Image: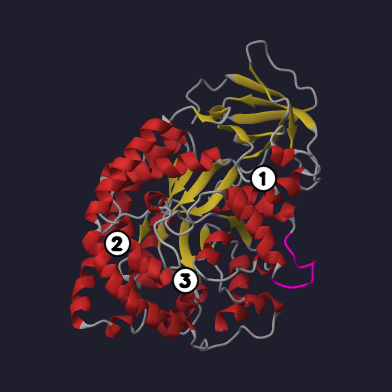
Amino acid sequence: MAKSPKESMTVIRGGRVVDIKGHSAPKADILVKGDTIVEIGAKVSAPESATVIDAAGKLLHPGLINGHTHSHGNLAKGMVDRVTLELLLTAGPYMSGARTLEDKYLSSLIGACEMVMKGCTAAYDLAAEFPMPTAEGLAAIGQAYADVGMRAMLAPMVADTSFFQAIPGLMDQLPPSLQKAVEAYQFSPYKASVKQMKKALHGWKLDRQGVHLAVAPTIPHHCSKEFLLACLKLAKDYDTGLHTHVSESKVQVVAGYRLYGTSLTAYMDSLGLVGPKFTVAHGVWLDSDDMKLLGDKGASVSHNPGSNMVLGNGIADMRGMLDAKVNVGIGTDGASCSDNQNMYENMRLASMVSKVQGPDNREWITTEEVLHAATAGSARALGLGDKIGKLEPGYKADIVFLDLGHINWIPFNDPTNQIVHTEDGAAVHSVMVAGRMILEDRKLLNVDMVQLARQAEKARERLERGRKPAKALYDKLEKVVNTFCPGLAKQPLHIDRFGGSHHHAHHGHHHH
């Protein structure tokens, strides 16, 4: 990412560097060579030629890492309320459809700006294009991150089965005229998607700028078996990660049992997808066998508590995951449903949702576990666990500078607790990625915000005009989906493994 020659040196003096486990932040200097931290200590000596950054009055923490988002969601922020996941999937064509190449870049740029301004330096982005990913679309989406100066693991979200075909029995509920209308929502045949992904992976040029490619079969039952195996082959051939939404809603779990006779996690494992490079998004309805399977195989889960609540999916069991040795990261999900891209908020929620699950406080997630998940945990999910997520020698210099003069930090009692429970992004003063400042004194250095707002408004007006027919169709479909899917969610699971274990106490909320 660093354009400067490798040997350029920077020394960050007088900041307080967070020690997550120690709940402390001793004063320390950080010496950076090129894009990498080489030394952290009380008095670090630096060559005369080194650039000096004064970090007095600043708390330094590793850049937060968003384990799961969707760049296409940023142009759709705030458009809906009171939608289930199934309604959100139905609304996809009207909320995210008809995007030009410029729209795809712009949507990605908006999200990257927001994340950086809120202390996030890298994201796992499951970007969707309809009817399939394109090499040029992915290049445009990735370029937006590079232009802001943020890292990304960009995974084209792919399917070859529409939502209406994927949910057993749903298509039959639609009157013939609506069945015909939703045929337009057909994804491209999977071979075409694979061809585009291969083209993108083969010609990818943004690796040096910290933007990499991965593979994301969107939801297991939205992909044919052949397609899932083709995604696995791509991931193996190009040595990338695999990321998919698993057991996000109860409807998905019921659908999985009806289609495969097992949990979705067990089904994906039977095809060979589950391993150290595999990330589950959400995992609200994982059972203890699923968690054990993921833990044993070295897989990750991105825990997205804000989204899980706003879509009514429930509360994922982070303690159960950690007990099963699953690597847990934290994510925001996309702005089309979760509306902001604030990792501080999702850390706070991750802490709080664990604490409402029962009175035994030994089961509650601690602030250090949350902060570790949002940095090192997400880094490992992105496949970058040895490069980012920690402020230590040998790691990339991805550093957030919080202003200790901000009201969030008056008084300054405990950095680990306060980053998770007090900080909301408002005290973010500066952000460095790969040894270069990309946000300084609350201003993005590489983006003109006035121009960004103007471009976004232009795009919004045009998209709003263009989406009337898709919105009208959604209004008709909404009634059917909203009757059928909640009915499906009330079904008992074929193999009910959600017995009295405390890990599944939260499933009770779904049976009203």
Q: Which residue is mark 3?
A: 268
Q: Which mark is residue 93?
A: 2
Of the residues shown, which amino acid type is indicated by label 3?
Answer: Met
Residue 65 falls left or right of residue 372: left
Residue displayed at 73% across by 54% down: 367
What is the residue that sits farthest to the top in this orientation? 48
Residue at 75%, 49% in the rendered image: 417
Instruction: Compute the Cα span from label 1 to label 3.
Output: 38 Å
Q: Is residue 245 left or right of residue 293?
A: left
- The kind of residue tagged 1 is Glu
- How far is disc 2 from disc 1 in space, using C-alphas? 36 Å
Residue 392 spot, x, y in % from top left: 69, 37
In the displayed structure, 437 sits above or below 467; it is: above
Quarter of the figure with residue 488:
bottom left
Q: Is residue 273 visible?
A: no
Above or below, 316 against 456 in this view is: below
Q: Is residue 364 magenta?
A: yes
Q: Residues within 10 Å of mark 1 (few under 14, many from 20)?
A: many
Q: Of circles 1 and 3, which is in front?
A: 1
Q: Between residues 321 and 356, which one lies in front from this camera angle?
A: 356
The mark found on residue 42 in the picture is none
**In contact (CB < 8 Å): disc 1 and disc 3:** no
Which of discs 3 and 2 lies nearer the camera? The answer is 2
> Is 363 one of the magenta-colored residues?
yes
**Quadrant, the C terminus:** bottom right
Q: Secondary structure at mark 3?
A: helix
Q: Earlier in the sequence, mark 1 or mark 3?
A: 3
Where residue 456 sits, quadrant-wise, is top left
Start-end of magenta stretch? 357-365
